[in-house]
Image (cartoon, helix red, strand yellow):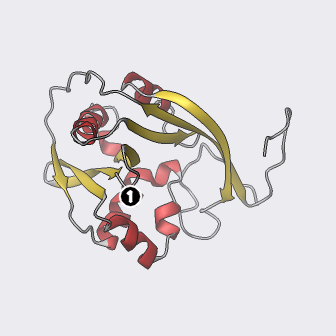
Amino acid sequence: MIVPDGYSDVPTGKIAAIVTHLEMTARPALRSDPPRAWSLRRVETPPLDWFRDLYRRVGEEWLWFSRMQMPDAELAARLHSLQLEVYALIDDGRDEGLLELDFRESGQCEIGMFGVTAKLVGTGAGRWLMNRALEVAWSRPINRVWLHTCTFDHPAALAFYQRSGFRAFRRQIEIADDPRLDGTAPREVAQHVPVIE
């Protein structure tokens, strides 16, 4: 469906975002790592409580809600797939960044989740984590890495991905129930997206 030019109503209780899909089809030259050092830990068979806690701490302000609403069995099947890898960025002994690399489609890697907690935004941790993501992804027999971001995300996210070597190839509008209205997310998060009841 193509949305017509002009304004389109978003129903009460819903949120709407513009989603941009980005890809790279060749291994890029990595940007220089920041001087501060973090570590990366692969989390084998991630416990659901651990995953949801880190997912919430990284993405709640940006209205990440899909994994919070996903039934346990569905989330476990996804996270425990042999072709999906979950990593945590470690800062001072604490998990403060989330990376999900999905190799389930042959020849491709989707960066399904990527982000750091608010305390690390602006420190270079995101660039460090992206460098590790690209190193791991391109160490496999793939010809494409892709991800998506949206207008709910950090205002610098799109430019960050482009600086990392991704190029936009598709744009969509996503409409969903506002997770702040059903208790999935706290009412006070994501002040940049108004609640309309």
Q: Which image quadrant is residue 33 in?
A: top left
Q: Nearer the viewer, residue 110 or 13?
A: 110
Task: Indicate whether 11 appears above or below 32.
Answer: below
Q: Which residue is mark 1?
A: 55
- Residue drawn at point x = 27 percent, y = 31 percent: 124
Front residue of this view, candidates 74 and 16? 74
Relative to 170, is 77 above or below? below
Residue 147 in percent (x, y) is at 45, 41
Q: Position of residue 132 (x, y in %)?
A: 22, 38
- With 38 as the anchor, is 179 left or right in this view? right
Q: Residue 172: percent from the left, percent from the top?
A: 65, 41
Residue located at (23% from left, 55% from top): 95
Q: Residue 16 at what x, y percent from top left? A: 69, 48
Q: Amino acid at mark 1?
A: Tyr
Most foreground residue, 158 or 79: 79
Name the residue at 41% across, 30% down.
24
Question: Which image quadrant: the C terminus?
Answer: bottom right
Number of numbered labels in the structure image: 1
Specify whether 11 is left or right of 121. Answer: right
Rendered view: 96 above or below 121: below
Label 1 secondary element: helix
Q: Residues within 10 Å of mark 1 (few under 14, many from 20)?
A: many
| Outermost residue to the bottom | 73
Query: Which residue shows up at 36% across the image and 35% down it?
Result: 143
